[in-house]
Amino acid sequence: MVVRGPGQSTAATGTPAGGRESSGPGQPIPTVARVTLSAGGTPSSPVVWQIRLGRDGNRNAVLLGYEAYLGTTVRLGEEPDPDDVALAQVALDPQLRLLRSAFAGNITAGTSRRGRVLATARVAGLRGSQAIVVSCVNTSAQRLFRADGGLMAHWHGGLSVSQVNMRRDDGRWKVYLLAALPASRCHA
């Protein structure tokens, strides 16, 4: 069993395009946007993974893609940004559109989520560039906060079990559809 904590993440930093200093006098330096993919969430919202990686490298790649998806969405639940460039690295439409809408709604409402997340996942099916993952995510330690930092009453996280449909796109496994499953599927 591999348990991953919040310190494990991948970040790609911006660099000048073509290695040039600028496009000319007075011109801004073109850069690539910073992409932060984090399987571990953040220090105040860590994702603790309980994953059994096996000998099948293809299945392991699917699980690592899902870890990046969940960790990135947990990070953005804490600091919502529907335009974060990392979203397109972990999700495809229609899930990408749903995430952007949800994070925009969080900004409008002035809310954010913080707290530990426990997660496990297993590959239920893999065929070519399509995969199905069964995901169990426990957010019962998370809390919902208002813009002023106060705790929102009457909100509690809990166990969420999902069928996660993923597709290999641009060299990465990305989530394109989630469907709720009964809690009993968490142990199947």
Image: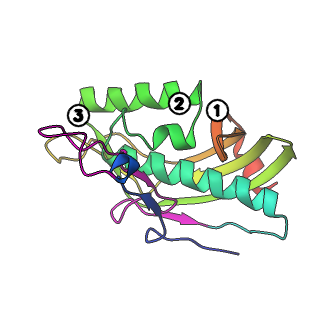
Q: Is residue 24 found left or right of 68 in the rendered image?
A: left
Whole-angstrom CA distance, mark 1 to mark 3, is 27 Å
Q: Nearer the viewer, mark 2 or mark 3?
A: 2
User: Residue under circle 1?
Assistant: 176
Q: At x 38% / y 39%, what residue is drawn?
A: 84
Give the magenta-colored segment's residue range: 20-49
Q: At x 37% / y 41%, what residue is drawn?
A: 155
Is 23 a magenta residue?
A: yes
Q: Nearer the viewer, mark 1 or mark 3?
A: 1
Res 170 → quadrant: top right
> Mark 1: which amino acid?
Tyr
Q: From this viewpoint, which residue is outermost toward the right? A: 127
First in sequence: mark 1 vs mark 2: 2
Q: Which mark is residue 96?
A: 2
Q: Is residue 88 found left or right of 56 in the rendered image?
A: left
Is 28 a magenta residue?
A: yes
Whole-angstrom CA distance, mark 2 to mark 3, is 21 Å
Q: Quadrant of the C terminus?
A: bottom right
Q: At x 38% / y 59%, what residue is drawn?
A: 45
Q: What is the chief secondary structure element of the magenta stretch?
A: loop
Q: At x 75% / y 68%, what residue is drawn?
A: 53
Q: Is residue 66 found left or right of 167 in the rendered image?
A: left
Q: In which quarter of the image is the N terminus?
A: bottom right
Q: Which mark is residue 140?
A: none
First in sequence: mark 2 vs mark 3: 2
Residue 63 in the image, given as x and y percentages of width and height: 69, 56
Q: Which of 165 and 170 is in front in this view?
A: 170
User: Residue under circle 3?
Assistant: 110
> Mark 2: which amino acid?
Leu
